[in-house]
Structures are given as structure tokens and as C-alpha cells.
Image: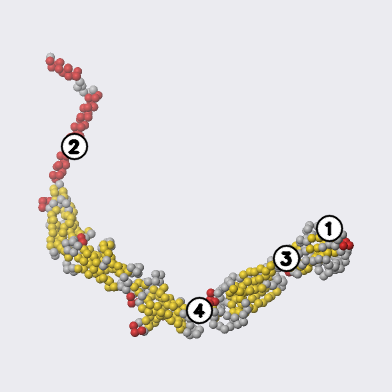
Amino acid sequence: MAGGRRAAPRCGWGWGGGWGCCPFLCLLLCCGAAGRPEVYMPSSAGSGDREHSQAGVQLLHPWECLLHLRRVVLCQPRPLRSGEAVRHHASGVRIDETEYSERLSVGEDKALSISKVTRQDNARTFICQVGADSQGVGESRTELYTYKIPAPPEITPNSAGIPAQSNDMLKIAQCTSENSFPSPNITWYKNGEPLLQEEDKTKILTTLVRESNGLYTVVSTLFSKVTREDRNSLFHCTVHYWLQGQMRTKDSPRVNVTVFYPTEHVELRVATNAGIVKEGDDVKLVCDADGNPAPVFSFFRRELGDSWQDMTSLADTNDGVLMLHNVSKSSSGLYRCQTLDLDDMTQHEGDVELVVNYIEGVQVKMEPSSPLHEGDSVRLSCTAHSPVKLDYQWRDARGRKVAEGNQLLLTNLTFETSSNFSCRVKARSVPGLEQSKQVAVAVKGKPRIVAISAPLYVRQDEVINLTCKAIAFPQPSFHWSVNGTTHEYMENQHMASNLTVRVSHDLLRAGAMCRVSNALGVSEKHIQLLDQKPSESKGIIIVAIIVCILVVAVLGSIIYFLHKKGKISCGRSGKQDIARNTSI
């Protein structure tokens, strides 16, 4: 509060005397000058965050004294009692012993500071008086206000739940704000919009408690009617408080309350990832009801004659889920979910048509169907039934794709062509749905020998292995012209027979005959055996020739070496000596 000239309080004016004056603490600034002094001083405020705050407040600053200041006196507005102590501040200011004496200080700019502000300091009035001898006294006043910031508001929602169909205003939540000064206010919000008291719709009860430490606790309770739309509403409260002359706020967390309401709509749906069901799948039927709490669920399936089969025993009636495992074509049909609300005993229903995609009746037809022989042709046709479009593919016994479409034409058949062919049927619109059918294409005929052991060089009494391979259908049997141990086995499409036998003189002379036969004919081939002795003589001669060549080469090398060393004389002088001796 701004101040101006006013009469001096009765303070026992004098430099050495006590103060018997106004009922408030005063700051007396005495100035000597020719004119009446004028004093300016703003309002001041302090704040604290605890009951006994360490925060301080500075009063009377800035202020101006138009005259030269001589001294400053802090006085209690009453006469100084006998024995009462007086102390002087370091700046020369006289400070009487009062409740403020330990918390006051005056700066060089003559600003008065109070430390450790408490709630008791609130709304105290302080006066600055400036005396100028005979010119009179000027003064100004200010009030000190203290504040305590409240703790963040705590909100507690109704945990029991609220029925939407109730005609009463029921408790939504309670909001509490503690340890504030002065007392704060609380407002309520729903989805960010303020809630005001409204007859028969919204009611707010507020309780204000002043604690022993002088701080305030405010408890606000919100009562309201709710609808099913409030199941997603968010409520919160806001505490409003003053701090240094400004209104501040703190918000609570946003909370949702449980709202109870009856079921109005029921939907039964097929819960699958792709939305398409095929044979062999596990299918989940989910019943969605918009009531809270969820109603009791029952499941049914329509059968012939418009009767309904109860399938509740296979369902989870609490969650509204019916599981069907390894479904087939027969699982298709109309399913129904029925709900019962235990509060008002109302029933609701929801239906869904389950379509299980399938492939059935896969068949392969072979034309002609009569026995096939090498050189013949055959046509394979594949058929199947399904509610969706099908694609056909042919594969051989090794799984290799050989053709597309529902027909496969094989020409110029051979034994090698004989194989198992499969028709693979796939549903293009239903991933993973496929069936296959296998057929054997058998080319009949007498055996054909495809491999036999080549002519062998053997020695008498040697144990040898002879092999004969053939292909035929029906499966052939093997016969050897000599006795021995036989072992028969399959190699790809070929039948093979292995004969283990000791070479005799007769076997070496006549060789062996492999004879293969079935019901359609006989094939045979001869295996020639060659005596290994001539081969050995030829080998010895070849070795002897090689040895002679090596001996000649070594002798030639020795003679050449001796000639170079002069050990053998074959020069012209030698020849002349020989000639002379001859002439004599």
C-alpha cells in the first residue's frame, strides 16, 4: 500500500527514550532537512515451503527518502519496560528486543529484511517513518503476506464401480490437497472440461481443515450421475493457490472409474488371422457384448430341422470364446451366441456363419486303362471338388514338377517312364489348402538287360563277381548258367543280380550266361572270361626288352666316359701305328 503524509504515532519521540506508540511494529527513519519528507514503499510478500521456512522477506525496498537520512530506529510500538534490552545493528541501526530482533537486518540501502518467515508473520503491517526535525514526519505502510505451496493433489477414484442406470448421484472420486497457506480451492474436470455443481446431476462437497501447524488441508468429493459413455471418461482435480500475489495451480493424475451398464448389443465373430478357414484349422469364435460386467455366455449350432445343438460345454463362458479344433467340411454352419444379463435377466443373441473351405474327391483317371507297353501313350486326368477355384499340378516320384493343369499326356512310353505320378490340387484363394492323389504308370514288357560285366581276364581258381542289370514289368527273375552265390537288389528303376563264383576250367572255357525272365518274355546275355596267362608272358617279354635297353644305355655311357678321360685311344696316331705294323 502506497503511503503519504500522516500524523506521527505517539511513540515517545526522542533519541534515547522508549516507544509507547501504535499497535504494530514500525520502522522509523528520521531525516533532518528543511522540507517535510515523503516516503514511498511497496507491498511485500514472503513465501515458505515448510512450516518454519528458512526463506526471508525484504521490506521497504525500493523506497525513497527525499531528505538526507541521519539514523534508523526499529522500535516495538510500546514503552520500553525497565530492564528490557536494546541492541544495535552493525549498520548503526538500533534494534529493540522483540520477537523480530533475531530475524531482522537492515542493508546499506536501508531495506529491512526478515528471515525465517512463519505463518504468524502473515498480514502484519510495517510502517516506515522519516523524521526531519521541525519539518515533521513522513511515513508509508506495507503489509507482509506469507504463502505455503500445497502438496500435489491426490485423487482416489471410486474402486467399487458405478451403475449407469442409477438415479442417484454417486461418488466418483475424492481429491485431497495438504499443507497449504492460505487455504486453496479445488475444481473438478471431466475429459478436460470443468465440472460445476448442477442440480440432480453433479454435486461437489468440500471440507477445509486447519492443522495444528497453521496449514490447511482441503478435501473435495465429486458426486455425479454417469452414463455408459463415461466408461472411457477421465477425471482429475486441480488445486488453486496464491503465491506472491499470483494464482497458481497443480493438477492431479487423470483417473478412470468403472461404470456398470447392461448389454445392448451382441456380436459373434470368427477370429482368424487371415479371415479364411480351411480344413484342419483350429477356429476361435468370439462373442463380443457391450455390457459391463460381461454377461453369461452360451453357444449353439444350428442343425437339420432348424434345431440347435448346445455347445456351451466346449466354450469359455466367462470370456465368451468357443474353440473348434481340427475343423472339417462338416464343421460349417450357423453358430449362435446368447447372453444373459443377471441384473435385469435380459437376453441378447448374435449369429455368425462359419465356412470351412475344403478339397475333396480328388481322383486321377488314366486313358487307356489297359496294360501299357513300351512305345505306347497315356493321358492322366485329375478331378476334385471344392467351393473355391482350384489349380492343378503334376509331379513325378522325385517331387519334380512336370506339368500344369488337370491333364498330363505321356508319349512313347518306356520302362524308364514307369513311375508314380501325383496330381496336386491347390486352392488359390485359401493359402495352405491342398490335396494330392498318386497314380502308378506301369509299362509292361519282357525284361531288357541294360548292363552286364565286360569281358574279364581271370585266373583259374580265382573268386570273381559278375553283375547283370535289367529292367522290366512285372518284376523279373535272374538265372545264371553256373552255380554260385547270388545277391539281387534295386538300383534306381533297375533290378540287379550279383554272382560270386570261383573260376573253374569249364567256366574259363565257356563263360557265364545271365538269363532274365518274367511272364512276358526272356532276355539273356553272355559274359566272356579270358585266361590271364598269355597276358603274363607278354608282360615278361616286355619287361626283358626294357631291361636290355637299359643295359645297353649304361654300357654306352661308360665307354663314352672312358674315352673322354683318355683311357681308350682311338686317335689318328694310333691308326698310323697300326698301319705301319701292317706294312712291315
Q: Are marks 1 and 2 in contact (CB under 8 Å)?
A: no
Label 3 or label 2, whichever comes before in sequence order: 3
Number of the label disc, if any, that sits on residue 292: 4
Separation of residues labelled 1 and 4 (CA atoms):
81 Å
Q: CA distance from mark 4 to mark 3?
A: 53 Å
Quick one: 527 or 403, which is closer to the camera? 403
Query: Residue 344 shows which numbered tag?
Result: none
Q: Position of residue 459 (x, y in %)?
A: 15, 49
Label 1 vs 3, first from the N-terminus:
3
Label 3 residue SS: loop
Residue 394, position in %: x, y? Answer: 26, 65
Q: Tag 1's secondary structure?
A: loop
Residue at 58 percent of width and 83 percent of height? 168
Residue 556 can be seen, yes or no: yes
Number of other residues with Cα within 10 Å of mark 2, as a class: few under 14, some 14 to 19, many 20 or more: few
Residue 264 lies, with reference to residue 453, above or below; the image says: below
User: Which is in the foreground here, disc 2 or disc 4?
Assistant: 4
Q: Which residue is mark 3?
A: 46
Considering depth in this image, is 198 or 513 the residue closer to the camera? 198
Q: Amino acid at mark 3?
A: Gly
Say which amino acid is labelled 1: His
Identify residue for label 1: 68
Q: Is residue 8 left or right of residue 226?
A: right
Q: Give amino acid for label 4.
A: Asn
Q: Is residue 223 above or below residue 92?
A: below
Hey, which quadrant is residue 436 in on the image? bottom left
